[in-house]
Image (spheres, grey):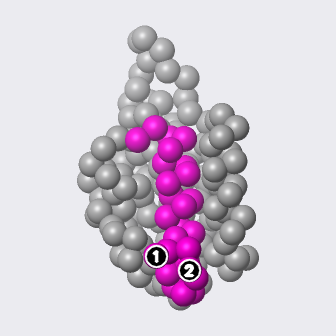
Amino acid sequence: MPGWVQQGYEEYAKRLPRECELVLKEIAPGKRGKNSDVARITRDEGERMITAIPPGSHVVTLDIPGKPWTTPDLAEAMQRWLASGQHIALMVGGPEGLAEPVKQLARESWSLSKLTFPHPLVRIVVAEQIYRAWSILNNHPYHR
C-alpha cells in the first residue's frame, strides 16, 4: 500500500483507546493473471482470511449487498460489539469479493456503498468511521 494509505489508516487507529483497538491483518492476495483460476484464488484467499480470525469472533463482512449503515447505525453496532466483549472481525474481500465460506461465517454484513471502492480507500474510510462511531458513543466533539 502507498504511504498515504498507511498514514491515513494509522491516524484514525491511533486515536482509538485500548478497549477499542483497531488491528489490521492483511491477507496477501493470490496472483492473478490473464488465465488465472479466479474461483480457486478467491477460495484460497477466503481460507487464509478464516485462519486469521481470532477464535470466538463476531464476524462482519463488508460487502455491497450488506446493510447500508449510517454513522449512527454503526455507533449502535459498535455499542453492541463492545458490550459483547468479543473480538470483531471486519472482513473485506479481494478484487472478486469475499469467498462464500467467509460470508457464511458473518453474523452481520455492512455495505459502505453501492459503489465499488479500491482497497486503499476502504481501509481509511473504515478506520475513520470506526473512530467517528466511537466518538459518538463517547460524546467526543469529532462527530458534529
The answer to whether residue 57 is visible is no
Q: Which residue is mark 2?
A: 141
Q: Quadrant of residue 75?
A: bottom left
Residue 7 at x, y percent in the picture: 69, 48
Residue nearer the viewer, 107 or 55: 107
Answer few, some or many: residues within 10 Å of disc 2's Cα (few below 14, many 20 plus, some between 14 and 19). few
Determine if the magenta segment contains residue 74. Answer: no
Determine if the magenta segment contains residue 132. Answer: yes
33 shown above or below 90: above
Residue nearer the viewer, 140 or 72: 140
Q: Main secondary structure of the magenta part?
A: helix
Residue 3 at x, y percent in the picture: 70, 38
94 shown above or below 74: above
Q: Quadrant of residue 54?
A: bottom right
Magenta residues (range): 117-144
Which amino acid does the dot numbered 1 rest on? Answer: Arg
117 shown above or below 17: above
Which amino acid does the dot numbered 2 rest on? Answer: Pro
Residue 96 at x, y percent in the picture: 38, 35
* Kind of element beneath mark 2: loop
At horizontal 30% and vertical 59% (from top left) the residue drawn is 66
Q: Which residue is mark 1?
A: 144
- Work out how far the residue at label 1 is from the one at label 2, CA to CA, in angstroms: 6 Å
The answer to whether residue 40 is visible is yes
Q: In which quadrant of the rendered image does the N terminus lie? A: top right
